[in-house]
Image (cartoon, rainbow, N blue to C red):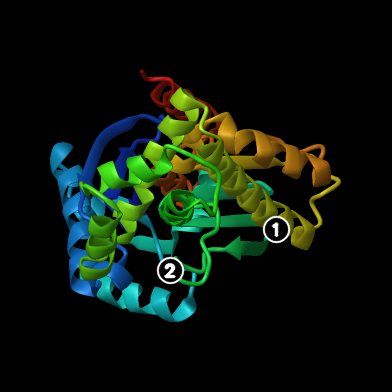
Amino acid sequence: MLWRIGIDGGGTKTAGVLINDAGEIVARSESGPSNFLSVGLDTAVKNIENVVYDLCYKKDLLPKEVKIAIGVAGAGRENDKRIITEGLRARGWDFILNSDAYIALMAATEGSDGIATIAGTGSIAYGVKKGIESRAGGWGYLLGDEGSGYYIGRRAMIEACRSYDGRAISSKLPQVVLDYFACDNQDDLVQVIYEHPPIRQQVAGLTRKVADLARKENDTLAISILNDAGRELALATVTVANKLGLTNEEFPIGLIGGVFKAGDFVLQPFTEQVKASCPKANIGPCKHEPAVGAALMIEPKLSEEALAKLRNLSKEKREEP
């Protein structure tokens, strides 16, 4: 029996799965964030370690009895990948390491040609064709991440101020932003934002409020922000497809990340723009969660029967109420 551990190391949490040869997820575990650029190398390694040891404990395994695949933010850059690898090497594990974008791609394509479009706190489009990889976006919140949760949250804050001034259309967004930051008025908001700047995840959390406003109130300003996010994500996706020469081919585009939970406000403009350039693309949720995508990097590959079982498990998880 070959036991596989797949780990999705993100900026909010570290999620792991333990998978057997039959394609069954026999254990799950979570720990704190493992983006070492945000929390430091020692904390990132410790949180990954916590997940590995917890998964092994649940099935009475030793770490030397499992193969481990890890995807973490930053590992797509060679220098950062070297730093993380060195930090983990002392554990004596049999492990492989790649970026969070790559394991999302594996979750979308299972190793075939295609693209994963990721829109969580940050955003990136990442694709592969015949072993050639390409990306667009993923520059971080200061340099890019258009279409991400942070992008939507920041736009909501800016447009709320513009609407309050009368420089943008009338909207309930100003009150939504005030309520979100527990402010009584615009002066309070300015004080909160500049004296205690919100962290990226807090800004990104506004996405849910913007989506609720669009859905429940049909708020034009909220809808336009979400539409713009969809178009930005489409631009990144089409850019990757162009680089890889996929535009006239049939290929999967796997969508992953909380921004897509806004539904048609993001998905409709995204799909329309992508289909205009890639008419044969098959757009839909990733076949698997990212932690499973990480496990799919491990050799030897799972059998087709085991993969089919994993796909069904992922579908059931997506459809949970």
- Along the line of sight, the residue nearer the viewer: 116 or 274: 274
Identify the residue at image location x=23%, y=64%. Answer: 191
- Along the line of sight, the residue nearer the viewer: 132 or 186: 186
SS at badge 2:
loop
| Residue type highlighted by circle 1 | Val
Task: Measuring from the top left, give residue 160's x and y in whole percent.
Answer: 43, 50
Residue 292 seen in the figure: no
Quadrant of the image containing the C terminus: top left
Q: In screen coordinates, is 3 left or right of 278?
A: left
Q: Which residue is mark 2?
A: 75
Quadrant of the image containing the N terminus: top left
Identify the residue at image location x=23%, y=68%. Answer: 39
Q: Which residue is mark 1?
A: 240
Measure the alpha-carbon separation of dots 1 and 2: 19 Å
Could you tell which of marks 1 and 2 lies nearer the N-terminus?
Answer: 2
As drawn, 266 above or below 162:
above
Identify the residue at image location x=20%, y=44%. Answer: 55
